[in-house]
């Protein structure tokens, strides 16, 4: 029995050390910004076609209009995907990714069209 316990302890020590080291490595996207309160810069110089080709949570699908994309996201909201609810004409609230007590994230239709590369 003592021999089995020693072998388990001998294996778990290196595993824990490797896991701890992996957690301390900064991600390559934020390596220079850690600890300075800076956010990663988003590349907004992409063409509208490139933005539409890489829509968040679209899983490779493309959409002709912003309304079609927003309707798709709303259907996916049942699977805990963030989506945008129209709170008043032309004003949208991001639904799904908000910490308790955090203010809502509000966007205009124009902001969403620019963000996702739509012209209509």
Image: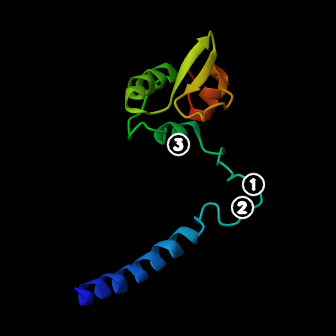
x and y, in percent, of residue 71 in the image = 44, 20
**Which residue is rendered at x = 57% and y = 15% of the image?**
86
Q: In the image, which is nearer the foreground, mark 1 or mark 3?
A: 1
Q: Which residue is outermost to the right?
A: 36
**Which residue is rendered at x = 48% and y = 79% of the image?**
17
Q: Which residue is outermost to the left?
A: 1
109 vs 88: above or below: below
Q: 69 left or right of 51?
A: left
Q: Earlier in the sequence, mark 1 or mark 3?
A: 1
Q: Which residue is outermost to the front?
A: 1
Q: Which residue is outermost to the bottom?
A: 3
**Which residue is rendered at x = 77% and y = 60% of the image?**
36
Q: In the image, which is nearer the foreground, mark 2 or mark 3?
A: 2
Disc 3 is placed on an element classified as helix
Picture quadrant of residue 1: bottom left
Residue receiving disc 3:
50
Q: Nearer the viewer, residue 56 or 83?
A: 83
Look at the image and tell me in which quarter the C terminus lies.
Answer: top right
Label 1 to label 3, Cα distance in Å? 26 Å
x and y, in percent, of residue 59 in the image = 38, 40
Q: Are marks 1 and 2 in contact (CB under 8 Å)?
A: yes
Q: Which mark is residue 33?
A: 2
2 vs 48: above or below: below
**Which residue is rendered at x = 49% and y = 39% of the image?**
56
Residue receiving disc 1:
38
């Amino acid at each position: 029995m003592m021999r089995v316990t020693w072998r388990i302890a001998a294996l778990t020590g290196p595993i824990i050390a490797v896991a701890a080291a992996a957690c301390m490595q900064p991600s390559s996207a934020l390596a220079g910004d850690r600890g300075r309160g800076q956010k990663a810069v988003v590349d907004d110089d992409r063409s509208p076609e490139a933005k539409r080709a890489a829509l968040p949570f679209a899983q490779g699908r493309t959409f002709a209009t912003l309304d079609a994309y927003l309707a798709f996201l709303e259907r996916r909201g049942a699977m805990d995907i963030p989506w945008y609810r129209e709170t008043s004409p032309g004003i949208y609230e991001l639904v799904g990714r908000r910490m308790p007590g955090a203010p809502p994230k509000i966007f205009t239709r124009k902001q969403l069209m620019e963000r996702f590369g739509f012209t209509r």
